[in-house]
Amino acid sequence: MVDPKSIDFYSLGFNFIETNTMFVANHKNGKWDEGELVPFGKFEISPASCVLNYGQGIFEGMKALRGKNGEITLFRPEENGKRFNFSARRMLMPEYNSEKFIDAVKKVIKANEEFIPPYDSGGALYIRPILFGYGPILGVHSAEEFKLIIFTVPVGPYFPEGFKGIDLEISKLYTRAAPGGTGSAKTICNYAGTMLPAKEAKTRGFAQIIYLDAVHMEYIEEVGAANFFAMINDKLVTPRKTGTILEGITRESILELASKKLGLEVEERDISYKELYDESCTEAFCSGTAAVITPIASVALNGQVRILNNREPGEITIKLYELLTGIQRVEIEDEFGWIIKV
Ligand code: PLP
Ligand code: COI
């Protein structure tokens, strides 16, 4: 067991740190058991389990934050519950009741309260619900037994750069998802295939990849583990939901903040990567639970580099970051009803 007092909450990155307690529920004979909190730890699994052989597994990512006055909050957890069930259906696994999902998440947070980074550290307790085909199979079909686990990890910024611009490489070699595939589900298989491209991009000095659509290799889809936004012709644009992007909860929230709080025109549309090379594109950023809002300093394709806003976070990027994190940290009034107290 890790002693929370031994953790330096002020220099956290996005790395695994063991916390004390996890939630486990089992689905057997067509129904879920009650589920329980147990010490974080290993469990037995058959080598023939569906998740190990055919990747029948999904996950979610959420953050619990510690507010200035000590309260613990979650951001739109019901949306994670909904997406969890959407992903479960796509991977032929049983859904989990959304109220019970939020209840279990709250229980795990409370049990690991000592691991929530302090308010002034800027960190969070990352919550990782996973659901997978646990039972043994041989042919390619669903498992008959499933396991839901929720564990937590204290985290700092996803990109070590923090709120500084990152350099991204547009890939014309790799894609992340294809029409009819599983791109909009948060299935574990979507992530395994992005590890090699990300590693290769890193050796060339890029923080991540901008994936293009698999049909035309032209339209921006997303950034590895975050959604993409740009300011083009003074409008905030983001790729439309094509079924191949992960429909981010941060993305949805940013669209609402941009139009309702900043009075910006927003567009969900096809965005050619070529538009990023035009002067009408003035800033860009990516968004996600882990990435929050991360400014994009430059994009590159085959050595052709476009520097954005002198590598500085753009004006709109900063405003949106301040609004989003202000609401999440309960410093700005939550007029949208997004914050839930734990
Ligand atoms: N795109 C991908 C591939 C992701 O893994 C994530 C992270 O969850 C996102 C986008 C952003 O989604 P959200 O804002 O719901 O965290
Ligand atoms: C998140 O933002 O929560 C994610 O799931 C991204 C993750 C793959 C690190």
Image: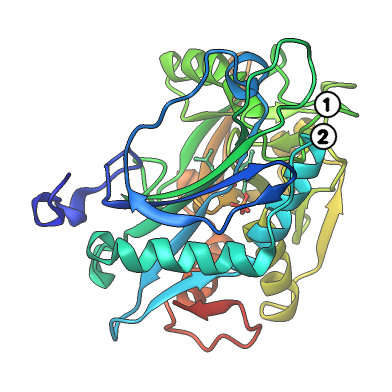
The numbered dot on residue 277 is none
Q: Position of residue 193 (x, y in %)?
A: 62, 18
Q: In this rendering, would 333 be left or right of 91?
A: left
Front residue of 113/244: it is 113
Against 147, is 143 above or below?
above
Q: Quadrant of the C terminus?
A: bottom left
Front residue of 193/260: it is 193
Against 223, is 214 above or below?
above
Q: Secondary structure at mark 2?
A: loop
Type of the residue with mark 2: Ser
Front residue of 258/38: it is 38
Return the disc, 2 or 1, that comes first in the chain's sequence.
Answer: 1
Question: How busy is the neighbourhood of tag 1: few (under 14 within 10 Å), some, or many (20 plus)?
Answer: some
Q: Which residue is mark 2?
A: 272
Q: Secondary structure at mark 1?
A: loop
Q: Which residue is mark 1?
A: 218
Do callouts 2 and 1 mark residues in contact (Cβ within 8 Å)?
A: yes
